[in-house]
Image (tube, rainbow, N blue to C red):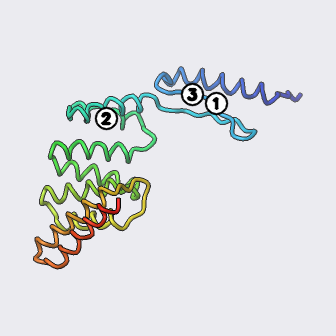
Amino acid sequence: MRIRISVKDALLITISLILILGSYFRLKDYEIRIERVGWRPFIIVNNTAAKKYEDIAVEALYAKDYTKALEYFNKQLKANPKNPEDVYHNIGMTYYYMRDYNKAIENFNKSVELDDKLISTYFYLGLSYYDSGKSISRARENFEKVITMEGRNKVPEMVRISYDKLGWIEELYGQHQKAQELWEKSNHYADRN
């Protein structure tokens, strides 16, 4: 004997099962909605806990409450966010502002391992190496990536500062002409944007 179920009934059964299983797996931290793409329904699940933790952490970061920011960024990581590379970047930023450059470098490197297209991560990784004095060659490498890469978060001010820092690195090594050229590019880039 075959049972025929309409698409509408199948969808209702599916939604019911998701809601029942969701309550079992604590879906209170998730938002579930159904969207139609063309003729096909898709179930969209958003992690509201991760978003809530991110909002609290970013607010704390802007308020310079770095301990609270770190606490909530780490909670966000445990809540399985969509983009953990962004969370590692934000943790790195927090450590950078705390002037704990070693931990900043560690977290920026984790971010780069997950997504090597985040230009702002390379920028702050370069700053962390530069400001710590830990590795000027690694600072140079990261600033050069900022200048040459194309990516989703290329900010003109980051490019300008990267040229400027590269100029200071060249000056440090006694390359006065090269430093001057880089500073001119920094000024030219600032004037263009």
Q: CA distance from mark 1 to mark 2?
A: 29 Å
| Residue ID at (43%, 44%) | 83
Q: Which residue is mark 1?
A: 34
Q: Amino acid at mark 1?
A: Ile
Residue 52, how many percent across, how many down?
39, 28
Q: Answer with the quarter of the image where residue 159 lies.
A: bottom left
Q: Amino acid at mark 3?
A: Ile
Residue nearer the viewer, 119 or 45: 119
Q: Which residue is mark 3?
A: 32
Residue 99, how many percent across, how many down?
14, 46
Residue 46, how many percent across, how many down?
51, 32
Query: Would you call the spot at circle 3 few (<14 residues within 10 Å), some (14-19), or many (20 or more)?
Result: some
Q: Earlier in the sequence, mark 1 or mark 2?
A: 1
Q: Are marks 1 and 2 in contact (CB under 8 Å)?
A: no
Q: Are marks 1 and 3 in contact (CB under 8 Å)?
A: yes
- Direction from residue 36 to residue 79 in the image, left or right: left
| Residue ID at (23%, 41%) | 94
Q: CA distance from mark 1 to mark 3?
A: 7 Å
- Look at the picture and state if 84 lies above or below 76: below
Q: Which residue is mark 2?
A: 58
Q: Are marks 2 and 3 in contact (CB under 8 Å)?
A: no
Residue nearer the viewer, 80 or 39: 39
| Residue ID at (32%, 29%) | 56
Q: Residue furthest right?
A: 1
